[in-house]
Image (cartoon, helix red, strand yellow):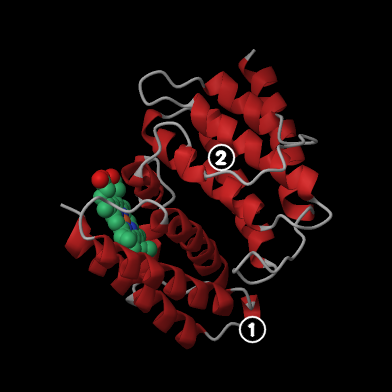
Amino acid sequence: MQLAWTRKVLAAVAAAAFVGVVAVPSTAKDPLPEGGASKQQEADLAFLKAAVEKKAKNSIDPVRTTAVLLAQSAQNQLGGAKDDELTGLRDQMIKLAEALDADKPDWAAAAKALEGAKGAKGDKKAKDLTKVKDFDISVLMNVYKKATRGGRGWEDDLIEMSQGKKPVTAERALELAQGSHLVGQLAAAMPPDAKKKDWEKLSADMLKTSKEAADEAVKGDKADKAVLKKKLEAMAANCTACHNVFKH
Ligand code: HEC
């Protein structure tokens, strides 16, 4: 039973990965560098696949956020020949996120949503992804948590690479910079009630610093590691600046 289920999910993920990796047209809408989105979506799907198989309680928020980031990425690319697939992927990811209630996560429904990403056709309308059920800034930020705590380990890697404690790799930098740009898009649309001006500036800085890092990282083997390290430092400084004002 367990094995059959796992096999089913693996097949589904391979299928979903196909949608994500192949169907990425470049449009003027996506501010991220061309070629970055497909790699990001691949990393997102790999994380989702492993986490949905494991069904760990501490990865519920990182899984929900990853699904929303993937939906955002798909939505950013609308306006080309692949809109049916992209809106389909987006809508399945919304389903996946909404299947996982913190107290009563429906992992089977989550697996089904992932499986259904292949060939799904979505609603052509743009959707406000900050309106996903029970989604808020704390759920969003959980994606940065340590891998050992169910997260994607992006914060640790960002800090360690930017401080020279870990070698800078273009691949990992691309994943966390692209991911952070999507986080920034959502954060910008989720201002708190107080200090809105500060939020506006700090989330705009998040978009700027993460885009600059992604632009360098997407060069892959040709990326300048020293330049990339500086870009990661700027990203890390932005995280701290916002947390100093808003995280208590
Ligand atoms: C625009 C403001 C803003 C920016 C920029 C920002 N954060 Fe946050 N972050 C917050 C807020 C607000 C919280 C507290 C959320 C809560 O729990 O209510 C938070 C919480 C967190 C948490 C704790 C999550 C948890 O609950 O365990 C982590 C980890 C984190 N942020 C990582 C990052 C990293 C890494 C970056 C930079 C790449 C970043 N943040 C950038 C506003 C921001």
Q: Pick whichever, 33 or 45, lies toward us.
A: 33
Kind of residue sitting beneath label 2? Leu
Kind of residue sitting beneath label 1? Lys
Q: Quadrant of the N terminus?
A: top right
Name the residue rendered at 77%, 44% in the picture. 85
Which image quadrant shows ligand 1? bottom left
Name the residue rendered at 34%, 73% in the picture. 165
Secondary element under disc 1, as helix, strand or loop, is: helix
Rendered view: 226 above or below 89: below
Residue 28 image point, x, y percent: 69, 69
Rendered view: 64 above or below 41: above
Secondary element under disc 2, as helix, strand or loop, is: helix
Residue for badge 1: 222
Residue for badge 2: 48
Name the residue rendered at 45%, 31% in the picture. 133
Q: Pick whichever, 143 or 194, lies toward us.
A: 194
Which one is earlier in the sequence, the residue at label 2 or at label 1? 2
